[in-house]
Amino acid sequence: MIYLDYAATTPMTDAAIETYAEAAKTVYGNTSSLHDAGGRASYLLENARTRLANKLGVNRDGVIFTGSGTEGNILAVLSLARAGEGKHVIASAAEHTSVHAAMNTLEREGFEMTKLPLDENGLVDVDLLEKSIREDTVLISIQHVNSEIGTIQPVEQIAKLARRMNISFHVDCVQSFCKLPVAVFAKEVDALTISAHKIGGPKGCGAIYINPRKRIVPVFPGVTHEKGIRGGTVDLPAILAMVTAMEEFTYHRENFEQFRNRLKELLNDSECDFVEAEGNHQLPSICGLCIKGVEGQLVMLRLNEEGICISTGSACDINSASGTKAILAMGHSLSKARQFFRVSFGSGTNEVHIEKLGAYLKKISLEARG
């Protein structure tokens, strides 16, 4: 099997598995219990919190462990928006499903949404964002890296704008954590989200950072774990495994750029087009593609028959009939959105995989050309 769906999830690293297994066997106390077993668990939990905060370059008091990136996005968006004095929120039309789910909840509570389109490069127009700000705008939520096409949004520029306008700013860093220098802007935002299983950690584990100086309204008032922001006994083995994966993760950018360029060479005279940004605005390990006249789902199924795993976009949108949000947000037709598929590289990707992928995609493209 050739696995080329790392943007969906990654295999756990050996070190993360070992850490998880050891913690599950030996550190089984509840971190909130007052006996020695609980005290040991609490010590390890707080040590993990400090390590993660140091990686992000933020105050450890703002780090909250969650059950996923999805949960983190929802907690951050709802907690910040409900604490504001206005009823207007801004996001891009291509945000992760979890952010849009939180926005839908806010709309039912009387909030108004502005969903910004993406330009031809898949980027948010900061000038348009600024023009969209109103007196009652309380929150801006923009992802750092789009999970479908891999474009890198100008979050540092947006953070400065939000700070100047005194508006809360949340950044979804699930796809960028450990791959891009998140710490350069983390202190300038009010909240950010990460997930363990995108970097070789376990599924069902993530974290959010919420500026501890920021007023919030907890989604579930009255819970006691994680500073009252996220209830439930924490999964200490998963948290320790996530931090282990974080500390050993290496993003092989040069290799991924070479793989991307080689794939482009192989598909140069085909009907296969890349949907991407230019230069430094593109994460090289995520490739959004379309083959003219062929639905992305068919491409995925054909490749699966050959033992190659790709996707038709975010796994959280797999049941959507409209295709990828990013393509639609860029102004493309519904027909093209349905032609979209995604290839994403990771630690196990090699040159042979790219050659085989290119050959099969070219074959599909030639068949479509007739």
Image (cartoon, rainbow, N blue to C red):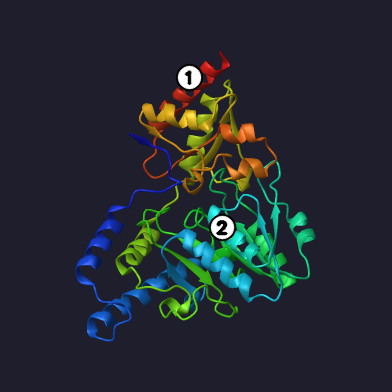
Please give the name of the residue rendered at 38% of the width and 48% of the height, measured from the top-left corner: 10
Residue 147 x/y as whole percent: 53, 48
* Vertical placement of residue 181 versus 61, above or below: above
Q: Secondary structure at mark 1?
A: helix
Quadrant occupied by the C terminus:
top right
Please give the name of the residue rendered at 79% of the width and 59% of the height, measured from the top-left corner: 131
Residue farthest bottom in this picture = 34
* Vertical placement of residue 91 versus 339, above or below: below
Q: Secondary structure at mark 2?
A: helix
The answer for how far apart the CA atoms under marks 2 and 1 are is 39 Å
Decide: few, some or many residues near mark 2? Use Cα within 10 Å; few <14, some 14-19, many ≥20: some
Q: Is residue 278 visible?
A: no
Residue 246 x/y as whole percent: 40, 60
Q: Amino acid at mark 2?
A: Ala
Residue farthest front in this picture = 108
Viewer-proximal residue among 158 and 135 = 135
Quadrant occupied by the N terminus:
top left
Q: Amino acid at mark 1?
A: Lys
Read off the residue under disc 2: 101
Viewer-proximal residue among 251 and 108 = 108
* Vertical placement of residue 359 versus 224, above or below: above
Q: Quadrant of residue 331?
A: top right
Residue 74 x/y as whole percent: 53, 64
Q: Is residue 219 visible?
A: yes
Residue farthest top in this picture = 370
* Vertical placement of residue 250 versus 303, above or below: below
Residue 59 lies left or right of residue 36; in this view the side is right
Read off the residue under disc 1: 363
For the residues carrying marks 2 and 1, which lies nearer the camera in this image? Answer: 2
Viewer-proximal residue among 370 and 62 = 370
